[in-house]
Image (tube, grey):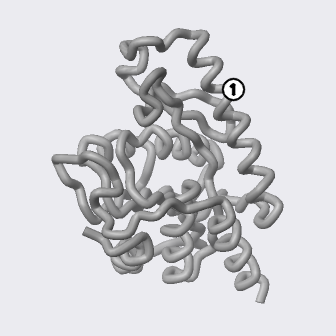
Amino acid sequence: MFKNREDAALQLAKRLKALKLKDPVVLGIPRGGVVTAAVLARELGAELDVVLSRKLRAPYQPELAIGAIGEDGEVYLNSFAREVPGVTEAYIREERDHQIAEIERRSKLFRAVKPPADVTERSVIVTDDGIATGSTMLAALHVLNAQKPHEIIVAVPVAPPETLERFRPQCSHLECLLTPSHFGAISQFYSDFQQVEDEEAVRLLRESRVKERS
């Protein structure tokens, strides 16, 4: 159990400090992941940025991810997606368009504060405050691999073991503090798991940007 996102990130940073990193950049998946990423970037002396990917929601069950979409617009579906009631080609197109619009909204919001980091030939640490199905993270990894980083490190406080296995072909290294076999929701592993608003994520990016320039 973690006290909050900062506590989890500090514990994660201790693990990552043992790695030899090349010009590291930490990318958080908004919004909660930006809090985790900000702590990691601070502790590792790394650049902070975001990676924008969104889950594709199941019809009638918006908490269930049938897949995800990355900034490149490519859709990644979970193996069970087409078995979910209501999932048709038309639904997938509609949900894709909806999430693309949200990615574009967030891009305008965050990129007004922080231009996208160049990840080519760098150690890229991708993080969130926890992972459930992993679809959003998987979409982010596909996008980042196309940019030819030196390595990609997935670092999260908590995730189911079977979900982590989905990432191994897409990254160089996995770091996860808790891998419970019985996994309900990410929030169950935190004493304090308040929702993170856009304003908080923007503030963290802005503060990091100021420190980089000073």
Quadrant where the N terminus lies?
bottom left
Q: Position of residue 132 (x, y in %)?
A: 35, 45
Numbered-mark total: 1
Of residue 139 and residue 24, the one placed in the foreground of this image is: 139
Of residue 13 and residue 129, the one placed in the foreground of this image is: 129
In the rendered view, does 91 fall on the left or right side of 9?
right
Relative to 178, say whether 60 is above or below: above
Q: Residues within 10 Å of mark 1 (few under 14, many from 20)?
A: some
Q: Position of residue 61 (x, y in %)?
A: 42, 27
Residue sitting at x 64%, y 34%: 99
In the rendered view, does 214 fall on the left or right side of 122?
right
Relative to 86, say whether 73 is above or below: below
Residue sitting at x 79%, y 66%: 113
Label 1: which secondary element = helix
Of residue 67 and residue 47, the one placed in the foreground of this image is: 67
Q: Which residue is the extreme one toward the bottom?
A: 214
Picture quarter containing residue 156? bottom left
Q: Position of residue 135 (x, y in %)?
A: 45, 38
Picture quarter containing residue 172? bottom left
Which residue is tagged 1? 97
Relative to 74, say whether 204 is above or below: below
Q: Which residue is the extreme one toward the left?
A: 181
In the rendered view, does 54 fall on the left or right side of 104?
left
Residue sitting at x 36%, y 13%: 83
- Residue 153 visible here: no
- Residue 118 visible here: yes
Q: Position of residue 94 (x, y in %)?
A: 64, 19
Q: Residue flagged by tag 1: what amino acid is it?
A: Asp
Of residue 150 and residue 79, the one placed in the foreground of this image is: 79
Relative to 129, say whether 91 is above or below: above
Quadrant where the C terminus lies?
bottom right
Residue sitting at x 71%, y 62%: 117
